[in-house]
Image (cartoon, rainbow, N blue to C red):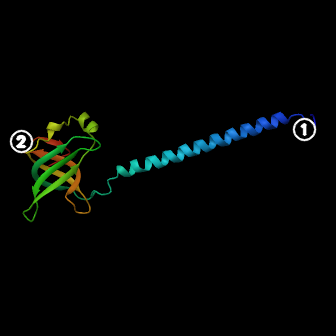
């Protein structure tokens, strides 16, 4: 038996088991890290503002059609008349309801049918949509960022 199991062979077996545990543990860590990085990328891309103009702020007056106060982003639908005299619907994207609620914005802040002048960073592709900047109602109430 001593020839088949030389002295100290148990130590070698335990070292091999420990080495395998280390390799398996390392592989698991790498797999989890890579998975996390792949999961984060769509989230970052989702919050990109690349489609909005950083060089232009468009201002127009219209009537609020709908204020969609729901996750993941608040949307304001505004009916206005374009330069050709035709009615046009603009879709303005804003922050999350949670974020805006902490700033005092509520569903009643933008009532349907109210006349409002808005400022937006328009889409660079020219579609009637943009990132909401600010609004000024006929009674002088200002919501968002507005400097005269």
Q: Residue furthest front?
A: 1
Q: Circle 1 sits in a helix, a strand or a loop, which is it?
A: loop
Q: Mark 1 and 2 residues: CB-CB less than 8 Å, in contact?
A: no
Across and down, in percent, residue 81 comes to 9, 58
- Which residue is the site of mark 1? 4
Q: Earlier in the sequence, mark 1 or mark 2?
A: 1
Quadrant of the image containing the N terminus: top right
Decide: few, some or many residues near mark 2? Use Cα within 10 Å; few <14, some 14-19, many ≥20: few
Q: Please identify the residue farthest to the bottom as the structure is shown.
A: 84
Can you tell which mark lies on residue 139? 2
Label number found at residue 81: none
Give percent across and percent down for residue 69.
21, 40
Note whether 15 is above or below 81 in the view shown. above
Q: Circle 2 sits in a helix, a strand or a loop, which is it? A: loop
Image location (x, y in percent) of residue 131: 24, 51
| In this picture, residue 38 sits left or right of residue 72 | right
Question: What residue do we see at 21% from left, 48% from top?
Answer: 133
Query: In the rendered view, does 103 fall on the left or right side of 31?
Result: left
């Amino acid at each position: 038996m001593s020839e088949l199991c030389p002295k100290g062979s148990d130590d070698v077996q335990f070292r091999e088991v420990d080495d395998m545990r280390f390799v398996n543990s390392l592989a698991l860590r790498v797999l989890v890290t890579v998975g996390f990085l792949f999961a984060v990328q769509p989230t970052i891309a989702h919050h990109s503002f690349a489609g909005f103009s950083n060089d232009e702020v468009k201002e127009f007056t219209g009537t609020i059609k709908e204020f969609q106060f729901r996750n993941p982003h608040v949307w304001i639908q505004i009916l206005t008349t374009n330069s050709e005299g035709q009615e046009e619907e603009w879709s303005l994207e804003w922050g999350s309801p949670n974020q805006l609620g902490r700033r005092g914005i509520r569903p009643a802040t933008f009532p349907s049918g109210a006349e409002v002048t808005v400022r937006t960073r328009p889409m660079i592709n020219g579609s009637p949509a943009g990132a909401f900047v600010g609004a000024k109602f006929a009674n002088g109430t200002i919501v968002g960022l507005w400097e005269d």
